[in-house]
Amino acid sequence: MGRAFVYVILGGGVAAGYAALEFTRKGVSSGELCIISQESVAPYERPALSKGFLLPEDPARLPSFHTCVGANEERLTPKWYKEHGIELVLGTRVKSADVRRKTLLTATGETISYKFLIIATGARALKLEEFGVSGSDAENVCYLRDLADATRLVSVMQSSAGGNAIVIGGGYIGMECAASLVINKINATMVFPEAQCMARLFTPKIAGHYEDYYISKGVQFVKGTVLSSFEFNSEGKVTGVNLRDGSQLAADMVVVGIGIRPNTSLFEGQLTLEKGGIKVNGHMQSSNSSVYAVGDVACFPVKLFGETRRLEHVDSARKSARHAVAAIMEPSKTLEFDYLPFFYSRVFSLSWQFYGDNAGEAIHFGDFSGTTFGAYWVSKGHLVGSFLEGGTKEQYEALAKATRLKPPVDDLTELERQGLSFALTL
Ligand code: FAD
C-alpha cells in the first residue's frame, strides 16, 4: 500500500511545526503536505519538557505548548492540521528511505512518496551504554528527549520525593533537570568530567556564578569524574552510582544528559553528511535536490562565520525550517539562509541568552555578584559572540544586533569598561 504527497516532512518535532505553519502561509493546498512522526502527538515546543513540564505545581501539559507558541505564533493543535488539510501520520517510524525513488517506508509497512522531502528527524539522546556503562533500562534511570521521556521523568520524580537524584552530565539538560529536581524537593548531585558546568559555552567565570547559585539552592557538584557503574537492588532498580574516582553516591533516581546524536542513519550512503549532520546549502537543500534538511540534523553554512555548523537549538530549528519551506515554495525569491546563532536557557529565576560564537577571547562585564552580567567574545579583532544573564528585551536585542554587525574591537580594556553600553550605543 502507498500514498503520495507533494511535500513530506519526516519527523514531527519543533522544525516540523514551524515548517507546517510556513507551508500554509505560502499557500500549500489541502492534501499536499504530510508529516510523519514517531511521536504520538502533534509537533510541540521541545524546550518545555525540561522547564514548565517538570514543575510540581501547575505544570505545562499539551495542548498548551504545541508549536508555534514558543515564537508567539499560532498554536497548531491536531485540529489546525486537519482544517488545513495537512496529513499527520503520528506514532509511525520511518524505517527506510530511498531518495532515488523518492519514497519512505514506514514501520507499519506503508510506502509514502514525495516530490519534496524535508528531513526534520532531530537527534537522539546518547546512551550510557555508548560509553561502556550498562543500566539505562533500569526503571529509575531517566533520559530526556521526548514527551514519553518527560512523562516518565515526572513519574520517577514523584516516587523519589525527598530522596537523592544523581544527574549525569553538566550541559543544559543536566543543568535544567537539576534545577527542576530541587524545585521538586529532591536532592540533586551533578556529576560531570569537566572542571565546570556548561563547558562548551560558559567561561569559568560565568560557570562559577551559576554553580554558586545552584549550590545556594542545595545542588551539589562532583566534577572531574565520570560514572563507571551502577549499584542495583534485587528488583533491578539503581540504588547508587560508582564513580571513576572511586567514590560512591546513593541514588533514588538518575537523570542522564550526556549529549545527542543527529538522526541521520536513514540517509547514510544516500546524502552527503558533514559534522555528523546532513550537509545542506544556503537553501537547506541537501546533495539530492528534492531533499532538504532542517533543525538539529542539518549542517548548514553560517554566513556570519564563513563555515558550516550543525546547531542543536530551538531557534535554529524554527528558522531553518521556515527557510527551507520558502526555498521550496518560492525558490527565486529566497536568498541564502543568513542565521545568527542564538541559544538560551532558563533555570530557577535565572535566564540567559547567547548570540554568535564563543571563539577567541572572552571579555566579561557587569556585576557578577548581582543579577545582570555578561561577556563578549572577540576573535581576530572583531566581536563575534555575546552572552547576557538577566537582561531586558532591549538589551538582548542590542546584543543580537551588535553580534551580527561583528564590529571591530581594538581595545579590550575599553570594551570591558563599556560593557553592555558598547552594544547599546552601536
Ligand atoms: P526534534 O524537535 O527533536 O524533532 C525530531 C522529530 O523527528 C521527533 O518527533 C522524532 O520522534 C522524529 N523522528 C526521528 N526519527 C524518525 C523516524 N525515523 N521516523 C519518524 N519520526 C522520526 N534549545 C534551546 O535553544 N533552548 C532550550 O532551552 C532548549 N531546551 C531543550 C530542552 C529539552 C528537554 C530538549 C530535548 C531540547 C531542548 N532544546 C533547547 C533543543 C531544541 O529542542 C532542539 O534544538 C529542537 O527540538 C530541534 O528541533 P528538530 O525539529 O530538529 O528536532
Image (tube, rainbow, N blue to C red):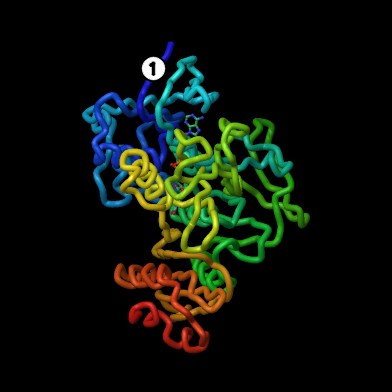
Q: Position of residue 249 (x, y in %)?
A: 67, 52
Residue 322, relative to residue 183: is it above or below? above
Task: Examine the rendered structure and indicate whether residue 152 appears above or below residue 173.
Answer: above
- In percent of the image, x 51 and y 35: which residue is there? 288
User: Which residue carries the number 1 mark?
Assistant: 3
Front residue of 61 and 36: 36
Residue 101 is at least partly visible in this image: yes
Q: Nearer the viewer, residue 269 or 377?
A: 269
The amino acid beneath tag 1 is Arg
* Residue at image location 62% in from the left, 47% down from the top: 251
Residue 375: x and y, percent? 48, 75
Q: Quadrant of the C terminus?
A: bottom left
Q: Identify which residue is drawn at 40% across, 27% down.
A: 115
Q: Residue reaching furthest left?
A: 83
Q: Cβ(mark 1) to ligand 1 < 8 Å?
A: no
Disc tally is 1
Residue 79 is left or right of residue 67, and the answer is left
**Label 1: how many Cα within 10 Å (few below 14, some 14–19, many 20+):** few
Q: Position of residue 40 (x, y in %)?
A: 40, 28
Q: Nearer the viewer, residue 110 or 258?
A: 110
- The residue most toward the front is 332
Label 1 secondary element: strand
Q: Quadrant of the N terminus?
A: top left
Please, which residue is most extreme toward the right here?
246
The quarter of the displayed image where residue 405 is located = bottom left
Relative placement, left or right, of 205 versus 179 is right
Instruction: For residue 159, say whether it is visible.
Output: no
Quarter of the image where one finds residue 32: top left
Q: Quadrant of residue 343?
A: bottom left
